Image (cartoon, grey):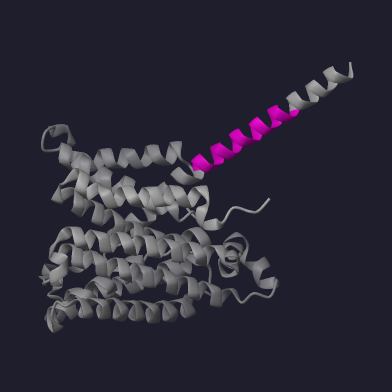
Amino acid sequence: MLKQPLILSKTNIVYAVVVGIMAVLPFVLDSRTMTILLTQFCIFAILAMSYDILLGYTGIISFGHAMFFGIGAYTTAIMLSDFGPSIGMFAASIVVGIVLSAIISVISGALTLRLKSHFYAMFTLAISGLFLVLAEKWRTVTKGNDGFTFRAPELFRERLYFYFLVLICLVVIFILLKRIVASPFGKVLVAIRENEQRTRSLGFKTLGYKIIASVIAGAVASLAGSLYAISLRFVNTSVLTMDITLDALMMTIIGGVGTLIGPIIGAGVIEFAQHYLSGLARDYPIFERWIIFFGILYILAVIFFPRGIVGTVSMRYHEWKMKKGQKTKASVKLREKEIQR
């Protein structure tokens, strides 16, 4: 029997249906607020996937991931503000942001990734803090904490068009990262996560693999930052703060570490939970401190989904499948005994 083509697998059909629903949602809901919320969800899903390449597949914890997000945001904002809001300049700003992020990833990775992961985490936190101070002090370019507004390309003044661009970016990045983690290179990353010393003893130069993984993660985070800046048409130093990194970390953990689809689900849970909990504060005074309920939601998610939503559901499914298989085997043996009698 011929094997089912990969493109027609059940999983890919489900993905296609979900993307189709997301493409139709803005027309069904017919709400500008909802379109903006969906756009934010897609942008943070891209950021969370980039973080999953580090944490989920390579086992590297970074506290400075917001640095790459901020580089992308500031590069796009400054270039569009100084050279004009055209589509060509927007594309060029994305490329420049990705190149800058890749260079910084290589430098920081070469300096620290040969050490244990917590040294890398501390070093990325220090560099991220350095960029934050630089953005606050270099007011002639960044306008400091106040930030600045800029004009987006004419095409993106229609929020719907920009949403479709972000959705396409999300799909393309997901496919690319999926191909990367399924490749031999991705298998080596997983091996490094599981046991770096043993992977090195097999002849793999693990430092090079980890640097490439950090470059990929940084480049994707920079793209997310560029899209975020266009979404707000405003940028300030908040894009470089630790909050952005913590959001990416929580989205990855809640969705499911090392799954790629998990961070997308985690981004959806967090973005929509923040939106609805803060919205309830307008009608119910108890939700004025909605951040407390948000914290409770985090705790419940960790308790009931210890491996993240995708990881835990997948684990339960496999357990159910194994039990079903054992029951089937037991019933077959019982029937064979009855026939022998």
Q: Quadrant of the C terminus?
A: top right
200 relative to 153 in the view: left or right: right
Q: Is residue 249 magenta?
A: no
Residue 258, x across and y down, in percent: 50, 55
The residue lying furthest to the top in this view is 341
Q: Is residue 317 magenta?
A: yes
Q: With respect to residue 298, does 260 lie above or below?
A: below
Q: How many marks?
A: 0
Front one among 138 and 284: 284
Q: Is residue 141 left or right of residue 304?
A: left
Q: Residue at x 42, y 65 (%)?
A: 62
Q: Residue 290 appears in which quarter of the rendering?
A: top left
Which x, y percent locates residue 42?
Answer: 30, 57
Residue under the image location 39 percent in, 64 percent down: 172
Residue 4: percent from left, percent from top: 59, 53
| Residue at screen point 76% across, 26% down | 332
Quadrant of the rendered image containing residue 49: bottom left
Identity of the residue furthest to the right in this view: 341
Evaluate whether residue 235 shows in this view. Answer: no
Q: Main secondary structure of the magenta part?
A: helix
Q: Is residue 250 above or below residue 117?
A: above
At horizontal 57% and vertical 56% (from top left) the residue drawn is 5
Residue that sits furthest to the bottom in the current view: 83
- Which residues are the magenta region? 312-329
User: Residue 105, how many percent across, how many down?
Assistant: 41, 76
- 277 to the left or right of 260: left
Given residues 301 and 24, the one toward you in this image is 24
User: On screen, 53 above or below 137?
Assistant: above
One can see residue 127 in this view: yes
